[in-house]
Structures are given as structure tokens and as C-alpha cells.
Amino acid sequence: YAPTRCAAAQTSTEQGILPPCHHHETVHDPQLVPCTCPLFSCPWEGHLEVVVSHLRQTHRINILQGAEIVFLATDMHLPAPTDWIIMHSCLGHQFLLVLRKQEKYEGHPQFFATMMLIGTPTQADNFTYRLELNRNQRRLKWEATPRSVLECVDSVISDGDCLVLNTSLAQLFSDNGSLAIGIAITTSKVHNAEAEM
Amino acid sequence: YAPTRCAAAQTSTEQGILPPCHHHETVHDPQLVPCTCPLFSCPWEGHLEVVVSHLRQTHRINILQGAEIVFLATDMHLPAPTDWIIMHSCLGHQFLLVLRKQEKYEGHPQFFATMMLIGTPTQADNFTYRLELNRNQRRLKWEATPRSVLECVDSVISDGDCLVLNTSLAQLFSDNGSLAIGIAITTSKVHNAEAEM
């Protein structure tokens, strides 16, 4: 994980502490984490345990329940940068799906999708998430280990270590401007192997 | 298929005839098809039935056998444009995997992978191909209906209707500069349903 985590996060994220990811000059209370909503420039900081309630109450982000859910991102034509965010509750944890439309190359918006665990990187390593698009006789699946919200979603997306869609593929997978993303969370194989022992 | 097929190919591809895809001014024998090797600028034309032997003999393209194979593309660092090509023989047909490194946006090479049936578009509709990358706790799967080699591989790739990888993802999935692509061909569901009746 080291190369994709914020440089300053290397030593402290395992303790559930987020260092200044966006290079603020302010000194952070080590018990607090900044709000993990991307793009909202939210000044809120709080304990990891209350991030979910903050996301629900302040940002009105919904929670979907179940091991396998479908998130319908509407209005995919909205100009970049735009984020679509949903929380996903399963296996005793809350996950955050971030779908971002962004112009890495000017005039060529792309879609980036990743999942973050609202928990520590150590906890995140126990899971695997799968994003699936399925339409027009095409299917695209991305499977990876979720990142922790204590890491920077910005760097995950700028590194391109996520599901990446160009505009034409996004259109092929969209129905009437909406993209249905199948989401499944499982415990990772290492975790399963340990459980079987 | 219509929007991605060469404009001139609409009426005649079902008969196994390739119109001038690259906008040659010469008149083609309707019984002949140009060589389907992308990027080689090959002047050869021939019947669909002898495309395979032409690819093997003139371009030294190997054939791998079996329903599920792994193609190892080496030297992924080579500069764009570069093609990696393999033939895949299964279910009584030959397929062509084209992996292309290309700079759609200057200075930002991407990898595009697609499969073509060495046969007509009607035959191609009976199959589904799957390309799978699996490494570093990440998995990416792309499933689609193969195109016919009578269509333009160039337009498939420029439309982005294929597996698309940015450089950083390609590196995550590569081992020592080589990318292992799992390839599987199945008969498509429509075909299966007909067979079951």
C-alpha cells in the first residue's frame, strides 16, 4: 500500500489517525479524523466512530444494506468534477463507494470508482470488494481490497488504482443517463483461510 | 454494431466481404478480404478461409489452443503504438486477440484489448469472450461479444469498446514487464438457449 497512501500517512494510519492529507498547516488532534467526503471541502473533523453519522446527517448520504447491492448513479452527463457517493453496510462494517467524474486529460472526462472502508487500513485488508457493470452484452468487473477512509480517496483516484471508465464505455453501460453499479463485499481469502484453521 | 463498424461495411460484411476499411481507392474483389493484421500495413488480401494461414506464415502469429488460455504479453514498456497479437483456437473457430498500446491523449499511453473472430459478424454473435487480469490482490474482467475480423479493429479500439487499461493499472497487473491475460471463449447465452430447445 505504501506507494499509494499519502506520504504523511505511513506511520499513523494503523492507529486510526489521519494526518493532514491535504497538507493543511494546522495541527490535528490525533484522536480526530477529518470528514472523509471527497469534493465537499468539509471542514468537519471527528472520531472514526462518528464518521458514518456525520456523513448521513450533514451530507445526507444514504446507506444501502446487504452483501450484494446495486447503486444507481443518475445524471452521468453532469460536468466533471462530480462525485456520486453511497454508504454500504455489510459484514458488520460500513463502506463508502465513491464514483468520480474527472478530467485527467482536459476535455476527456473519465469515471473512477473505488470503495473505502470506514475503518482502519488493517481492518480494510480483511475484505474484498467487487464492482460490476453489466449491460448491452458487455460485462466489466473490478475486484480489489478496499482502502481505508483514513487514506486519501484523491490519491487512489489520481493513481488510477480503481475501476476506470472512459465516456464511451460509461455510455454503453448506462441506461437513460444512469449507471447501475453492482457492489459485493466479501471477506478476503487470507481471512477465510484463517477462519478455516 | 452499426455505430462502430466501418461506414462502408454495413451492407456487405454478413457475406464475408470486407469493403475498403482503410479507405483505399482500389476496387476489391468481393470474394477477398484484406489481411486483418493491425498496424503491419500488410498489402495482402485473401479469402476469409486463408486468413489464419496467412497470419501464421507471413506474420508468424502463434495459435494457442483450448477453451481457457493465458497469453503473456512481454515488454509492455515498448513505446506506443505497439501491438501484441495471438490467435486462439477453440470451439471450432479461430479468434484473434489484439492488445494495443496507443496514445489517445499525447504523452498518456493506454492499453486496449479486444478479441475478433476470424469469421463473419453473424458467427461472432454466437460467442462471448472474457479477458481477465489477476495480480496484486486486484482482478479485472471484461466480457463482450467478439467482433468479426471483417470489421475494423481500429474503430473498435478508437471507440474504446474494449478492455482499457491506463499505464498505472497495467503496471499493477504486470510482472517484470509482462502482462498475463487470461482468455476464455464461451458460446453466448442466446446460442445456448437455442441448443437447449
Image: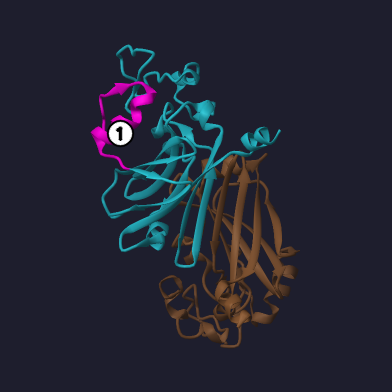
Chain colours: A brown, B cyan
The answer to whether residue A41 is visible is: no
- Looking at the figure, which quarter contains the N terminus of chain A? bottom left
Q: Is residue A73 magenta?
A: no
Residue name at image x 66 percent, y 55 percent: A182
Q: Secondary structure at mark 1?
A: helix
The answer to whether residue B188 is visible is: yes
Instruction: State the residue position of label 1.
Output: B55
Which stretch did the figure color magenta? Answer: B38-62
Could you say which quadrant of the image residue B88 lies in?
top left
Residue name at image x 30 percent, y 13 percent: B26
B195 left or right, relative to A101 = right
Residue B173, image x and y in percent?
41, 60
Q: Is residue B51 magenta?
A: yes
A19 left or right, relative to B196 = left
Could you say which quadrant of the image residue A60 lies in?
bottom right
Residue A33, image x and y in percent?
60, 80
Q: Nearer the viewer, residue B46 or A24?
A: B46
- Looking at the figure, which quarter contains the C terminus of chain A? bottom right
Q: Nearer the viewer, residue A94 or B35?
A: B35
Could you say which quadrant of the image residue B197 lies in?
top right
- Label 1 Cα neighbours within 10 Å, binned few <14 / some 14-19 / many ≥20: some
Residue A80, image x and y in percent?
54, 50
Amino acid of disc 1:
Leu
Residue name at image x 48 percent, y 33 percent: B147
- Name above or below for residue B133 compared with residue A10: above
- Name above or below for residue A173 compared with residue B190: below
